[in-house]
């Protein structure tokens, strides 16, 4: 059904492509000019709609800078938040807003990295306000590859390996027919490429796409399971402790394949599951649906993603009789030392 509607809307691809091409031409030729701010800026983005692994990459890059003594903050547009304009999420010591007002991904990275953060649709104005509120020397921009109005010192572009391997798929077309925000030749703007295989085996770049990556610094990344965390008590468990248990899987992310795949690899039963749309804003209706499904299936627990967990925590009282856990994952960069050198080189 989704493919049918994509095909129905396919004539709009021409219009969308033309707009993107003209816009990029204006930037490349200097008609549109990027604005610099008083901080080192690192952008983490992609060419597709969701699912490449930007959030773990933002966390990894931010923590890398912290570990090397750099003062760093995170700036995002705050996708699917119910607020607008500039909003300081954290001053580095406490989170000053709710997940609904800043967005699930922003709340997650702020909580995980414990650094100053903010949201703003306008990255230039947002960065300027941010630098007034906090004292930092660097900013990590979340999902900003297409936001070319702000000057950046390093452009990191991330790809899901599974997407790249779908060379004959409808997905490798521009929106709205496919899931690409820009064509593959836009890779030329990137300083660094992260090829994220998530939990799969590493594969070679398809011959059809190799030319776009030929002169780029390429790093290979994958996910590593850090464990399973109790949402309410924060107690840490190993994946093996859930092996064979009958859990209710609750998931509201763009591409749940990788999440379900890692459960399968660890022999965790995911027969019973509730899959919601990406960035699902849970309401009492969904929470009651979770409760109903949990008791109908006689599940041992609810098992979810970390991104869903930051929203479900608001319903801890309603779900006080149900044990809820989330799978915590970390991004691993195979060529760690070289990646660190590349990121830190912007401060030289």
Image (cartoon, rainbow, N blue to C red):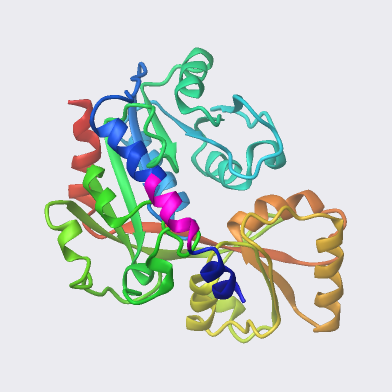
Measuring 48% from the left and 61% from the top, which residue is drawn there?
Answer: 11
Image coordinates of residue 226 in percent, x first then y, are 47, 62
Image coordinates of residue 177 in percent, x first then y, are 48, 64
Q: Quadrant of residue 20?
A: top left
Q: Is residue 284 left or right of residue 47?
A: right
Of all residues, the one furthest to the top in this rendering is 132
Against 280, residue 166 (above or below) is: below
Q: Is residue 312 left or right of residue 89?
A: right
Q: Quadrant of residue 269?
A: bottom right
The residue nearer to you, when weighing 70 against 89, is 89
Image coordinates of residue 113 in percent, x first then y, are 49, 40
Q: Is residue 194 visible?
A: yes
Quarter of the image for the N terminus: give it. bottom right
Against 42, residue 209 (above or below) is: below
Quarter of the image for the C terminus: give it. top left
Image coordinates of residue 280 in percent, x first then y, are 68, 56
Tell me which secondary structure the magenta stretch mostly adopts.
helix
Q: Which range is magenta? A: 11-18
Of all residues, the one furthest to the left in this rendering is 215
Q: Is residue 175 visible?
A: no
């Amino acid at each position: 059904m989704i493919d049918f509607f994509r095909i129905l809307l396919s004539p709009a691809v021409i219009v969308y492509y033309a707009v993107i091409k003209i816009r990029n031409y204006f930037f490349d030729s200097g008609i549109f000019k990027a604005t610099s701010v008083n901080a080192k800026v690192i952008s983490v983005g992609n060419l597709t709609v969701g699912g490449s692994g930007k959030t773990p990459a933002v966390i990894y890059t931010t923590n890398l800078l912290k570990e090397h003594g750099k003062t760093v903050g995170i700036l995002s547009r705050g996708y699917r938040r119910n607020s607008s304009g500039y909003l300081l999420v954290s001053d580095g010591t406490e989170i000053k807003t709710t997940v609904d007002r800043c967005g699930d991904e922003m709340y997650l990275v702020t909580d995980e990295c414990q650094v100053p953060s903010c949201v703003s649709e306008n990255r230039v104005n947002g960065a300027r306000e941010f630098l007034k509120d906090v004292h930092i020397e660097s900013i990590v921009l979340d999902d900003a590859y297409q936001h070319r109005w702000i000057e950046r010192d390093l452009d990191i572009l991330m790809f899901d390996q599974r997407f790249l391997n779908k060379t004959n798929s409808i997905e490798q077309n521009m929106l709205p027919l496919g899931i690409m925000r820009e064509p593959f030749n836009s890779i030329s703007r990137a300083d660094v490429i992260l090829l994220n295989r998530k939990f799969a085996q590493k594969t070679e770049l398809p011959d059809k796409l190799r030319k776009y990556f030929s002169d780029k610094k390429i790093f290979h990344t994958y996910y590593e399971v850090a464990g399973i965390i109790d949402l309410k008590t924060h107690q840490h468990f190993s994946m093996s402790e859930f092996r064979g248990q009958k859990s209710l899987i609750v998931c509201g992310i763009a591409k749940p394949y990788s999440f379900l795949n890692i459960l399968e690899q660890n022999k965790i039963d995911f027969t019973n599951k509730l899959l919601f749309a990406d960035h699902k804003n849970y309401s009492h209706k969904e929470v009651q649906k979770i409760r109903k499904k949990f008791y109908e299936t006689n599940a041992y627990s609810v098992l979810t993603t970390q991104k869903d967990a930051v929203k479900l925590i608001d319903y801890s009282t309603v779900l006080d009789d149900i044990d809820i856990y989330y799978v915590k994952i970390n991004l691993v960069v195979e060529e760690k030392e070289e990646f660190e050198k590349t990121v830190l080189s912007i401060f030289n």
